[in-house]
Image: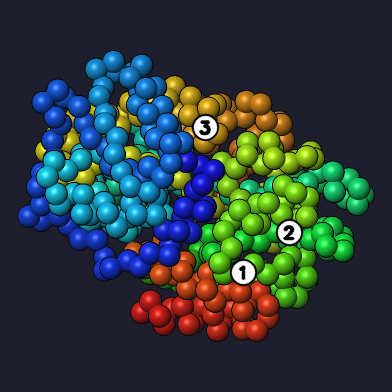
Amino acid sequence: MNTNRRTAARAGAALAVVGVMTALAGCASSAPASDGSLDMYTWVSSESDRAQWESFVSLAQKEDPNLKISIDGPSFADYWTKVKTRLSGNNPPCLLTTQAARAQELSGLLMPLDDLIEKHDFDTSEFDESMLQGMTVDGTIRAIPYDAEPVVLYYNADLFAAAGLTPPGVEYTREQFIADAKALTTGEQKGLAISTGIFIPNAWTLADGVAAVDDDGGLALTEPDFVDQVQQFFDLVGAHGVAEAPEAADGSDVSQAAFTSGKAAMLIEGPWMYGTFDEAADFTMGISIVPSTSGEAAAMTAGSGFGIAQNCDDPDAAFEAITHLTATPVLEGQAETRGIVPSRAEAVPAWSNGKSPEAAEVVDALLGNATAQITTPTWNQVETLFTQYAVEGFRGDKTAEEILQTIANSVGE
């Protein structure tokens, strides 16, 4: 599931969102089956996805041998629209999944969990704070996160050594990053590979503490600080020439292949890609923080979690299941076999197994100062429009101010 997350996210962004999800008044209620099993509706884009969900259940059954969960769902791209229809039909599921970045979009479908958290004496202080914030809508937690993935900078250590450069670590200023990227840009080789979409630019802005959403939950795309940050990102291509401008139709696999083939020395991506990149790359790979003006570590985290449908008839049973699905041994198992960075702090060391000590230090530093990617119900439109228009920004044909104003006008904010 993780290896396809960015690609799937982009495909999902291509779907138009028809209105804001609303509460499920008048819909059929959901309840455990007569044998006590619960239905979980989630994205199942591939056999790998299904295997991961089944692995969650299998590991959770070691916590509760009586736990029974059946899994069903469409592709990631279809999930965000089909989940509402699924909850309106017969025998709707009790358990749902969501990304933190989509919690706003599904807020009308997800039951607030705060009362259940208190009733079951569930200690949320053990979970990554940024992800809990990402799962919070209107002041209430809508899902318990299972991963907390700080976006990182991957680099080709061999190219750094060949250029006589000092590889970055848990500190990396933008001034040094740009100087390194220029030194690593020779012939057809670029210092950085860039993909389409707003996910990576958002990680870039949050490395400097600038969010795309304001404190009231509205879009802040046209705020001067956000505009300046996006212009800095565009300038990596247009002004500094250290990366190729991505094409709007490119998938994230294009920039990923540029990095693993050695055609680009650096790439900003999620830590869930570490194993895939390490296996594909014929060079020594390192990871660092997304560069910031100060050089200090500050991350945008992405991640997903388990929630309960608003019309679930037995929320206690569903919440009990979630407590088992997010237990420390379960998340440690997912980290070791699937490469997720667990949402529970005590399970994070399991992600480091088999990786360099420097990689663990970077992830720890980033999780120490992390902000979830929080979006709005209109974010799908923002993602689609940014993918469409950003090419002109990278090429220098339009400014970030012009592009972001166009997007804000189009989504009505």
Give the residue type that dot 3 points to. Arg
Q: Which mark is residue 247?
A: 1
Q: Earlier in the sequence, mark 3 or mark 1?
A: 1
The residue indicated by pointer 2 is 192
Q: Position of residue 381 (x, y in %)?
A: 40, 70
Give the residue type that dot 1 points to. Glu
Q: Secondary structure at mark 3?
A: helix
The residue indicated by pointer 3 is 338
Alpha carbons under labels 2 and 3: distance apart: 27 Å
Which of the 4 image quarters holds residue 208? bottom right
Give the residue type that dot 2 points to. Leu
Which quadrant does the C terminus fall into?
Answer: bottom left
Which of the 4 image quarters holds residue 240? bottom right
Q: Is residue 57 placed above or below 195 in the rendered structure?
A: above
Count of all numbered marks drawn on residues in the image = 3
Figure coloring:
rainbow
Q: Earlier in the sequence, mark 2 or mark 3?
A: 2
Q: Secondary structure at mark 2?
A: loop
The mark closer to the camera, 2 or 1, is 1
Alpha carbons under labels 3 and 1: distance apart: 30 Å
Which is more toward the observer, 182 or 216?
182
Q: Position of residue 54 (x, y in %)?
A: 37, 29
| Image point (17%, 36%), residue name | 315
